[in-house]
Image: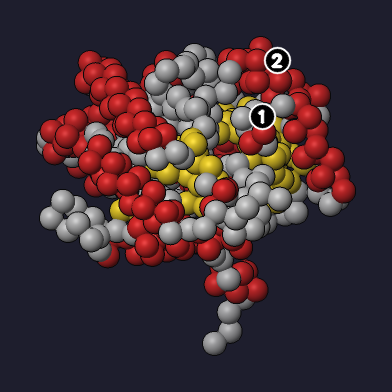
Amino acid sequence: MYISKRGQRLLEHQQPLVRAHFLCAQNPWSPENPDGYINLGTAENHLVFDLLEPRLNASPGIQEHHTHYAELHGMEAFRELLSGYLSEMTGVLVSAGELAVASGSSSIIDMLVYALCEPGDGIIIPAPYYAGFDHDLKTRVQVEPVPAFTSPENGHKLTLEVLQQALLQAGRRTIKVRGILITNPNNPLGRVYDRKTLEMIVAFAREHKLQLISDELYAKSVFGDRYISLAGMSEEAGIDYHIVYGFAKDFGLSGFKTGMLFTRQEKLLKAVQELAYFMPVSNATQKILSNLLAGKAWLNHFFEENSKRLAQASGVCHQVLSEKGIHAEPNNAGFFAWLDLSRYLSSASAEAEMELYQHILENAKVNISPGQVFHGAEPGWFRLCYARPEQMIRESVSRISASLEHIQIPEKT
Ligand SMILES: Cc1ncc(COP(=O)(O)O)c(C=O)c1O
């Protein structure tokens, strides 16, 4: 059968994280199934369902108009509630008319780059970065991610030099860079950017006339430090910025596939709203989410409790890792521990990192994600998602550590 070149490209697409997710789902660990797989590779929050359940299962109040077509970029009533929520979150006044809703933040990013870039253009992304961006940028729209590599040597700090280097690299590859995409709080590093770094990013975008895209999906999953949205400072600097948000992370609702774009750029928004026709969120889902947003007191309690639980899980995870002699970068947000297992590599290479990944998956039956899918600068780093019950974290770290004991650490030359 004939299949287009575009279709062929999709067949070649690799999704190692998705494969591992479903492998674990076939035989998941539980206290009753102690030999099962533990999946700490998927960025999901498994600590809050008890808080969500009563509200999700209360009658959603579906009315007849919900059963018919509504605006495919999000019902007006839903966008009204979202505008209030995002105004509080970002610190700038957001209106319902500046939003587009679609099925997942991945779709939002795909549509955004479709409307901002020509095929072959580039977007700078500080690395390590969320693996899905490759898919979002490249698959349909053929936009090139241009990694700005941060280094383990200085704690993965994002500096001006790192951004300049990425721009230079893009120039060498004759890629026209249209924008910069940051994730704040960061996945996979699990921390917020401080004000100084954000100001540096804004100044860089301004100097090089780049569109600034800020994925702020983990804005409320912060403990320890303060998240600062890029919205306010971009506005002060007078540059174009676009905020991506969604319900997958802060609300623990990855299965509801609901994301949104906030932008002040009318033409861009109109273009994205047109595309949202193909990727809408059902009215029933929007109504259930509206019920969550409408309960201010509930929402405050939910986020307070969520932060406490994430802080607790992160604390336990870092403690048991350190007891086993495994270094993880300091963190203050998200669900992630960024681990250094480089001393267990047979050589400093991507292949050796993949071997170690397979070794841990097969021997410890724990799925953690190899740094190469996030474009880590050096091999041997892994992302572990700890938003899981304490017993599961303890069990996995102890299994990982036991599986590493069988590995002969190569002598340093
Ligand atoms: C930074 C970031 N952006 C976007 C997404 C995708 O979100 P969604 O499931 O809403 O498409 C993820 C999921 O892991 C993420 O970590």
The Cα atoms of the two marked residues, 1 and 2, are separated by 28 Å
Residue 190 placement, left or right of 389: right
The amino acid on which the numbered mark 1 sits, given as a three-letter code, is Asn
Q: Which residue is mark 2?
A: 237
List x then y, in percent, for residue 126: 65, 37
User: Hey, which quadrant is residue 240 in on the image?
Assistant: top right
Where is residue 204? Give x, y as percent.
76, 25
Residue in the foreground of this view, choosing between 78 and 2:
2
Q: Position of residue 155 (x, y in %)?
A: 61, 30
Badge 1: few (under 14), some or many (20 or more) residues near its Cα, within 10 Å?
A: few
Element on which disc 1 rests: helix
Q: Nearer the viewer, residue 250 or 82?
A: 250
- Which badge, 1 or 2, comes first in the chain's sequence? 1
For residue 124, side relative to residue 2 (left or right): right
Q: Nearer the viewer, mark 1 or mark 2?
A: 1
Specify few, some or many for label 2: CA neighbours under 10 Å numbering under 14, 14-19, or 20 or more.
few
Q: Position of residue 282 (x, y in %)?
A: 32, 47
Q: Residue at x 60, y 15 (%)?
A: 195
Q: Residue at x 48, y 58 (%)?
A: 407
- What number is the disc on residue 29? none
Give, as a three-letter code, the residue at label 2: Ala
Asked which colour scheme the image uses, the reply is secondary structure
* 11 relative to 289 in the view: left or right: right
Quadrant of residue 270 in the image? top right
* Of the pair 36 and 303, the residue shown nearer to us: 36
The residue tagged 1 is 154
